[in-house]
Image (cartoon, rainbow, N blue to C red):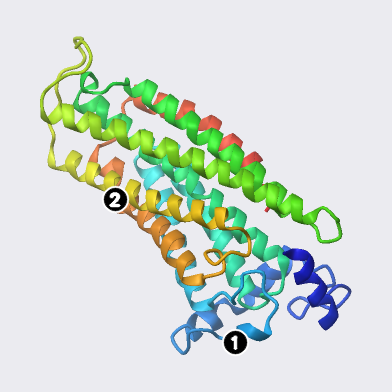
Amino acid sequence: MWRNFEEKQNEAGSLKGATCEFCFCTSHNTLCFFSFAFLHFCHFFFGLFMSTNGTVIDPTEVLSAYGYVPTRAVAVIFLILFGMSTAAHLGQAIWFRMWWLIPTAVLCGLGELVGWSGRYWSSFNPAAANPYMMQITTTIIAPTPLIAVNFIVLGRIIRRLGPCYSRLSPRAYTRIFLSCDLIALVIQGAGGGIAASANSANPNYITTQNLGGHIMLVGIIFQFVALCTYSFFGIDFVRHYHASRPVRAMISSDERGEMTTRVRLMLWALVLSTSVLFVRSVYRIIELADGWTGTVITTQVYFNLFDGGMVITAIWAMNIAHPGLLLGRESGLEAKDSEKELLKLGSANSSHTNFV
């Protein structure tokens, strides 16, 4: 894909060696984007209310790896929504002293901000390869830490309502599914790095890019299976709790907890978050299986609805139905378990997002 794309771009006049119109440099690196965004953000924010796209571009006349020109207004809206949610999650994590939310919900928000910044950048220069690869890799990987929030919260609910109704102990639940999330993150990060390194100057660039896409697809499928398994155990726990049928021998600490209104709201928030992330995973599997030039990946409305829309719903659900508000501050044991497991997830994620 990139070879044909860049050959056509070179025929029209390559940007290499030309002066950047934003910061007058010749490097065309990420710093150009940040300088440009800082100087022009306010202008385009107000322009959002004047038109759907500040610069009218005919997609048929633009060489874009997307297959379309990303709509600037949509990118700005998602940047605002993700920015607000990320800031709120950081404040809530500090207020409730739930530090594990920083390498999960906050990290997801930051990743989405990077991805949508790439799409915003592409709305001005849809022919540029760097912002395209930046957004495709980060928006695929970013929701992975958010899924970990669901795993941890359900473990806390199980501990509160009665571990005897769960086939797995709360600690085993957290460790098993966080490990699955970590594995999925590593696989997706490796695939994203390989795809981003594809260069049209290399005769094997198509093979390299397809290999990266296939590895990311494996990571998403693995994550999807883990999400389905998590949902099965969660439904099984709720069913046995309501039927008052323990599935394991009760011990002194396994007294049946009360299903309060707040716990019920937290469960419904988990249902909503898990459902939209489930839809998003199905979309991503179909998208990557369809290929880099397939109909799904080159249709903007699908991405905006089934990826951006689903992730923003999930992350805001955890803002509104926050575990600190509905379940209260964590006990020493809960905090220790959550933070210990998330240390691995946070360190792994930081080491696999440097390719962006």
* Tag of residue 272: 2
Q: Neighbour class for label 1 at 10 Å: few (<14), some, many (≥20)?
A: few
Residue 173 place in picture, x, y as percent: 37, 25
Q: Quadrant of the N terminus?
A: bottom right
Residue 124 place in picture, x, y as percent: 64, 78
Horizontal side of 261 relative to 26 (left or right) equals: left
Q: Which of the pair 18/99 is nearer the observer?
A: 18
Residue type, mark 1 in image = Thr
Residue 46 place in picture, x, y as percent: 48, 84
Residue 255 place in picture, x, y as percent: 15, 18
Q: Which residue is mark 1?
A: 55
**Image height of 13 relative to 299, above or below:** below
Compute the Cα span from label 2 to label 1: 37 Å
Q: Which of the pair 139/207 is nearer the observer?
A: 207
Point 61% across, 54% down: residue: 137
Q: Is residue 355 something that shows in the picture?
A: no
Point 21% across, 10% down: residue: 249
- Pointer 2 with pointer 1, Cβ within 8 A: no
Q: Which of the pair 95/183 is nearer the observer?
A: 183
Point 44% across, 49% down: residue: 90
Which numbered disc, 2 or 1, marks the residue closer to the eye?
2
Residue type, mark 2 in image = Leu
